[in-house]
Structure formats: C-alpha cells, structure tokens
Amino acid sequence: MDLSEELLGIFTDEAAGRLGVIAAGLLRLEAGADPDLVTELFREAHTVKGAAAVVGLDAVSRVAHAMEDLFQELRDGSRTPTHDFVDVLLAAVDGLRILLPAMRMGTDISAEADRLGVMVARFRSGTVPGRGAEPQPQRAPAPVPVPEPGPHGPGAVVAVAPEPSVAVAPQAGPRPAEALRGDAVRVPITRLDALVRLVGETASANLRVGRLLVDRLGPAATDLDPVRDLARSLNELQEMTMRARMVPIASILEPLRRAVRDLSRDLGKSVRWEARGLETELDRGVLNELGDALLHLVRNAVDHGVEPPDERRASGKPPEATIAFHAMQLGSEVVVTVADDGRGIDLGQVRAQAVRRDPDSDRLDDDEILELVFLSGLSTAPRVTDVSGRGVGLDVVLHGIDAVRGRIEVRSRPGEGTEFRIRVPITLAVLPCLLVSCADQRYAIPMHSIVVVQETADHTAPLWVEGQPVDVTALASVLGLAGGTAPDRRAATVVVVAGPTRRHGFAVDALLGQRDVVVKGLSGLLPRIDVLTGASIEPDGSVLCILDGGGLVERARGAPPGPDGLERPPPRASLLVVDDAVTVRELQRAILERAGYAVRTAADGPAALAVLAESPADLVLTDVEMRGMDGFELTRAIRATGRLESLPVIILTSRATDEDRRRGLEAGADAYLPKSAFDQGDLVAAVERLLGPGRPSGGERGSP
C-alpha cells in the first residue's frame, strides 16, 4: 500500500504520543506492577501494532506485537517487571521513536525495526539477558537509508525508475531549547487558519473605520498619511499571512510518481513520467483536497489511457508511453494538467454505457458525452480489478475538485491521448470577486469561476462563448428572489460562470466592481446551501453572500430541488467506524468514502452507542481492543437494542486467532477481518456484500 504523506503524518504523530505513554509507564512499573497500569500499557502497544499493520508498516507492527506479548505476560502473572524487563522495552520504545522521522519521510526502516523486534523476542524467550542485551537502551539504531530528494528541478523530465538512496543516520527529535533554533518552525495548520481569520477581521474593521472617517471628515480622509499607511500595512500583512499557508505543488508529486511507477510495472506497461511547474504554490488546504483527485487521474492514465508496448508498436507509436504533469499560475488560479499519449477515450463505449442508464443520452453530442466520464458508476473497463471497473475513480476526481471550488475540462482524441485540465483557486481564504447587483441585493462571484462578462440584447437567448452555445438564466430566478431582471427587459449584463464541467450565463442588474473578499464559512447550524460558498462582512456591517459557481450552474440546469427549494445530493449508505486509533479511523474513513459511503467515526464503544442513538447507521465497522467497552461487548450491545438488532457489524481487529473469531461471530458480528491481512479491496468488498456498493441507502437493513 502506498502511504500518503498525510496518513503517514497522522500515524507517526499518534505513535509518538503512544510511545511516550509507554515509556512513562515503564518507569512507573519499576516501582511495582499496577494491574491498571499494565492493562493501559498493553492497550497502547496493541493500538500501535494495529495502526502500523493497517498502514502497511509491518516491521513496526511486529515490534509492537513483541512488546504486547511481554505486557500480556505481566497481565497473566507469568512475569514480573524487573529492571531488565524495563530496560529492554525502553530500548525498543527509544528505537521506534528515533525511527519515526524516517517513517514520516517514507524511508524503509524494516531492517532496523526487525532488529528491535528480535531483541524483544529474544528477551522474552530467555535467550538473551535483559541488561547488556543488544542493543543497549538509549542507543540510536544504525543509519537508515533515506531517499535522496534528487536534483530534478522545475521542468525536469524524470524516467520512472527505482530511486537512489544515501545513508543518513536518523536523529532524535530536538529538545525544547533546540526547537527554537534554525530557520523553520512547525506550526499547526489550525493556528494558521486562526491567524488568517484574525487578519481578515482586522481588514474588515479597517474598511468600517475608513467608511466612518469619510462620513465624518469627507472624501479627503482617505488621503491622510496614517490612513494610507495603515491600509498598506494591512494589505502586506494579509499577503504574508496567505503566503504562510502556501506550499509548492511538488510536495504532492512523489505519490503520483510512485503510483505511475508501481502500477505500470504491475500492468506490464512502459511509462515515462514528465513533470513541470513544480515550484507553483497553492494553499495547503486546496492542495490537500486536490491530492486524491490527481492520484486518481494518474492511475486512470496508466490503467485506461496508455497502451501496452506491443499495442503501441503496432499503431506506430514508441513502446514507452508518456504521462505529463504540468502546473502553472494564471492570475488568481492554478492550472494543473495531466495528459497521456495513449489510446484516448472511447466515446462509443461511454455512449453505450450512458444509454444503458438513460436512453435519452443517445441524443447528446460528443462533447456532452465526454463529460459523462465523471458520472459515478460509469466505467469502460472490461473487467473489475483493484484498480478499475467500479466506476468510482473519475467521480472521486470531480468530487475533490468541487470541494475546492474548481473546475475540470477533458479533451481526448482517438489514438492520440487524453488531457485533463484542472483549474483551482490559489486559496479559498481570500478570493478576488466580482460584485454584482441582483433584486436590490449585492452578491460576490469568485473571479476564478467567471469565464466572461458580456452585454446582451436578449438574455433569454443563448450566448456564444468560445464557439459554444451557453444558456442564460436571470440570477434572481436561480436564487428564488422576487424582482431582478424582468422578463420583459431583454437587454442585460450576463456573467458566464463555469462549474466543475459545465458553463451557464446569469443575467444580473448591474456590475458593482471587483475586490478581494475575506471568506468566512457559514455556521454549522445552517444546512448546506449549494449556491453559497461563504460570506463576508461589508464596511457598513452588512453581510455579503459569496456565490458558488458550481452550485449556480447545477441549479440553473434544472437539478431537482429538495423540499425547501435547495438542491440535495442523493443519500448514501451511512457507516460508523469505531476504533481508538486515529490512524486506523481516518484510513478506513478515506477508503470507504472513496467507495461512495457516508462515514462517521467514534473512538470507543460508548461513543459509538451514543452516535447510533442520535442517528442510525446502515453498518458498523469496529475494532476489538478498546478502552471501556471492547468490540465484542459493543456488538452484543447493538444486538440487544431492538431497533439496532439487525444492524450489520464487521469486526476488523489485530486479534486473529480462531478463538477470537469464534467470540466475534458468537457476539453477533456479520464478518470478522484480521488487520494483519488488511487490504482495502477486501474491506470494501465485505461492506458491499452486506450493503451493496456505495449508493443511495434504503434506510433499514434489507430495504431495496
């Protein structure tokens, strides 16, 4: 399994905390064996073992398993916590903690971790005494190979091949005094978000003060030196704050490059990877959301796009295919392109798939048919594999791009290749917007979603934009407002807006200018409103609504409204993931959400029951070893609750003995999966066997 930087970061942060708990507990153990303390240490080692196994760090999982075995012997009374016992376990803990930075870099630390596991196992078997056992406590492991970043700068063309490596000794984390030295400081993203919010509020307050000064002193107040100096300083502060959130797009390149390498080798294809524009910067939040979409695109290019070498030779192409990645900034947007020189999209197959779902699709032109590749469940793969065939890949791409208010275009030529072009705003915290008037109200439309602004003599007729007809609707009508552009007033200003894949024109009463708008999220107490992306505070204290381009386009094109007039996505089967390890919870959430399910999480059994009491789920996925109430007890509690007794339950655990499996099934579990053999395909398959694919839910178990 390829580990994403985010998931690996979650695991190493969690493991560092749990290893710290174990180290502190071991020192307390020397004063005497406290049963509650021993149980706590056992649980911490067990959790590290399970989380490491799930993310594919099997060597780390084996070390934690060996530690868990020693703690189990304390629990059953067959061993006492001697100094040698504590020495060996502290050595194992210290070794793992020193290896954490290398794990985070994606370095293969299997050999060093295995050495630690052997040390603990030998002590347990009595073949090596504790004190003086190898290695000595507090001794750093031998150097660990760390991949060299490489000399490839912007514009580099890199052939897919195994990476070179150099030996670099991993260093322990810095002491508090040392953490303040150097030219970089780790800052939680939540703190940066709070800083951006405060800067935005300060800018809004400055606008209100400026308006007050003009009211009191007249227009000349804006020319006062203190007023201009304050405005300039605030603008610089806002710009520097936003830049603090920026990261180069190169930071997500390695998983893409690795995916191309691994998948092409698995499929017997020869693929050259080209990457340019890697210095282009994006807001970290935007880039995180975009990462999954780009990963799906490059995997799709390898699997569906490029041909095997023999097929390429037969068609007169070089046997080595090319997948090109390019990023560049254009104004307030970043454009990212993923292109291949493969066989292109078979429009005939896409049309046939679409017609099976909706016979009216046969009337669509080729450009409209090409847009259908993003539909959930539509796939042209000849068979279902762990890579393709389920029709969820490009649907996930569209979902990820929509989450950052972006849009995507696809171009394809038979026999020549396919290009996906993604446009996303550089940041979602401060947006350059066009202000418009509609039905005596002011609205902001983000500039990155605007294609063109055009005057028209008849807004009831389609516009021609870049050689394509674009339908036009009065913005007031789309927003459900009385007034606005009257039906009998045909001349109007039209703002053409692009959604993720489509365009639409909106007639407005007037244009009010352009400015940067500090975006504030809507309250969680409000229902999701698809036509709004946020709001801002005007200088006079009023609220300025910021419209969402994709939501406007979909509503204007006639998406069926909900009972309150708002669009609603179809409900998805709801799953509840229960595990006390945050790494495991987040991994399972990501896997199941990509498969089309709505996922909630709980950290233990009582929390899970509280979630189910508040809102039922369609299926529960639970660990066994948890604080307070284990997975067996949780399953029995679910079966004992009348309205939940038929709720499907899957147990996913490190406890894989036949006895444990029997206990799980006797408790009422519908499936029992061991983490040691964890595979995301098996997990999704188990859920689908009980519920079907991630589709709209039927509500109760057994519903159609």
Image (spheres, rainbow, N blue to C red):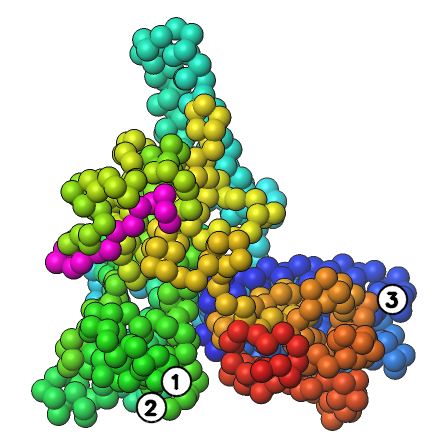
Label 1 crowd (10 A; few <14 / some 14-19 / many >=20): some
Residue 476 drawn in magenta: yes
* Relative vertical location of residue 686 with respect to residue 234 in this rendering, above or below: below
Mark 1 and mark 2 residues within 8 Å of each other at the beta carbon: yes
User: Which element type, helix, strand or loop, lies under badge 2?
Assistant: loop
Separation of residues labelled 1 and 3 (CA atoms): 50 Å
The tag on residue 382 is 2
Which residue is rendered at x = 31% and y = 74% of the image?
Answer: 373
Query: In this view, which residue lies farthest toward the left?
Result: 316
Label 3 crowd (10 A; few <14 / some 14-19 / many >=20): few
Q: Which residue is mark 1?
A: 389
Query: If you read the primary sequence from the N terminus, does the residue marked by circle 1 or circle 3 appear first?
Result: 3
Query: If you read the primary sequence from the N terminus, does the residue marked by circle 3 or circle 2 appear first?
Result: 3
Query: In this view, which residue lies farthest toward the top?
Result: 217
Query: In this view, which residue lies farthest toward the front?
Result: 488
What is the quadrant of residue 73 in the picture? bottom right
Query: Which is more toward the observer, 143 or 504?
Result: 504
